[in-house]
Image (cartoon, helix red, strand yellow):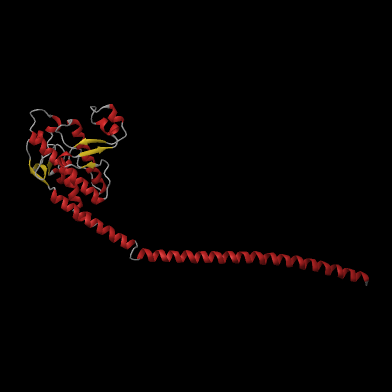
């Protein structure tokens, strides 16, 4: 009888110990589950707040100051730029006239540019370009002497001043900072080169070594009178580079390194074309 009681006590003790172990295990699981529930609640709150912020952002984008508004504003700015460029083209019209002596022209223009006539073939309709009725001639830049026609020099300087002003205006309308900034002064305008040691060494070796070594911008005259003709020729080269920059900005290739007026005409023509306006 006593042995049975002892056996039952032992069984009851084991059951009690097992019960305590199970209770402790359940308690730990409850704590873990409670922690996970709190984590899920916190995650749910964060998700709810993120969703609310996303909805607010969507409403903001669709609102008066959202993406649609910005797109309309950009279209208005582009249309205004087109209007301003059209005024520039009226102020400084670039037109084709009957060609003079070929060796005297800095600018030549032919129908081959648009019609696709291969290089080397003679186009039927050939002429030169003028800006406000003025030609750009090459003689003042290569054969400046005592006998050079002063009126011809002045006309070329005035024409370059017109081009410089037109380029400056169009760049401001398109909000494009020019790689070679201009200092406007009519027929006494200048263009600045911030890397003369690189750019000018390929075009001329007549500048002082102190100029090429300087880190400050160097100004080159867009006129010949009283200036080194090589510096003036380099200024025209930089002016055409500015035109090339603007053409590339609107997705058009330059017509050539010596085509200052042709590039200006192509620039205004493209900006005023329906294809560009509808972009």
Q: Position of residue 218 (x, y in %)?
A: 26, 35
Q: Position of residue 17 (x, y in %)?
A: 79, 66
Residue at (89%, 69%) from the top-left corner?
6
Quarter holding the N terminus is: bottom right
In screen coordinates, is 63 left or right of 2?
A: left
Is residue 121 shown to the viewer in this render?
Answer: no
**Quadrant in the picture for residue 19:** bottom right
In screen coordinates, is 154 left or right of 44?
A: left
Q: Position of residue 207 (x, y in %)?
A: 24, 28
Residue at (22%, 39%) from the top-left corner?
191
Residues 146 and 175: in front is 146
Residue at (67%, 65%) from the top-left corner?
29
Residues 119 and 184: in front is 184
Residue at (14%, 38%) from the top-left corner?
157
In screen coordinates, is 123 left or right of 81?
A: left
Which residue ends up furthest to the bottom in the rendered image?
Answer: 1
141 w.r.t. 10: above or below: above
192 w.r.t. 250: above or below: above
Is residue 129 shown to the viewer in this render?
Answer: yes
């Amino acid at each position: 009888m006593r042995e049975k009681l002892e056996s039952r006590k032992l069984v009851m003790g084991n059951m009690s110990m097992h019960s305590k172990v199970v209770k402790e295990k359940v308690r730990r699981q409850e704590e873990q589950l409670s922690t996970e529930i709190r984590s899920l609640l916190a995650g749910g709150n964060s998700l709810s707040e993120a969703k609310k912020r996303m909805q607010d952002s969507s409403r903001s984008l669709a609102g008066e100051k959202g993406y649609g508004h910005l797109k309309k504003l950009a279209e208005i700015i582009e249309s205004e730029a087109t209007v301003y460029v059209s005024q520039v083209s009226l102020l400084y019209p670039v037109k084709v006239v009957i060609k003079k002596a070929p060796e005297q022209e800095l600018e030549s223009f032919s129908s081959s540019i648009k019609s696709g006539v291969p290089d080397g073939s003679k186009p039927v309709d050939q002429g030169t370009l003028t800006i406000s009725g003025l030609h750009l001639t090459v003689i003042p830049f290569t054969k400046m002497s005592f006998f050079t026609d002063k009126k011809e020099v002045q006309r070329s300087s005035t024409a370059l001043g017109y081009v410089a002003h037109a380029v400056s205006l169009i760049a401001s309308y398109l909000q494009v900072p020019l790689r070679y900034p201009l200092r406007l002064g009519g027929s006494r305008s200048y263009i600045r080169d911030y890397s003369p040691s690189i750019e000018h060494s390929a075009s001329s070796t007549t500048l002082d070594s102190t100029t090429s070594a300087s880190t400050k911008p160097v100004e080159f005259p867009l006129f010949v009178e009283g200036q080194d003709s090589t510096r003036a020729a380099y200024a025209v080269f930089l002016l055409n580079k500015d035109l090339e920059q603007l053409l590339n900005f609107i997705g058009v290739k330059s017509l050539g390194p010596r085509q200052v007026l042709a590039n200006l005409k192509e620039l205004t023509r493209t900006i005023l074309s329906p294809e560009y306006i509808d972009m």
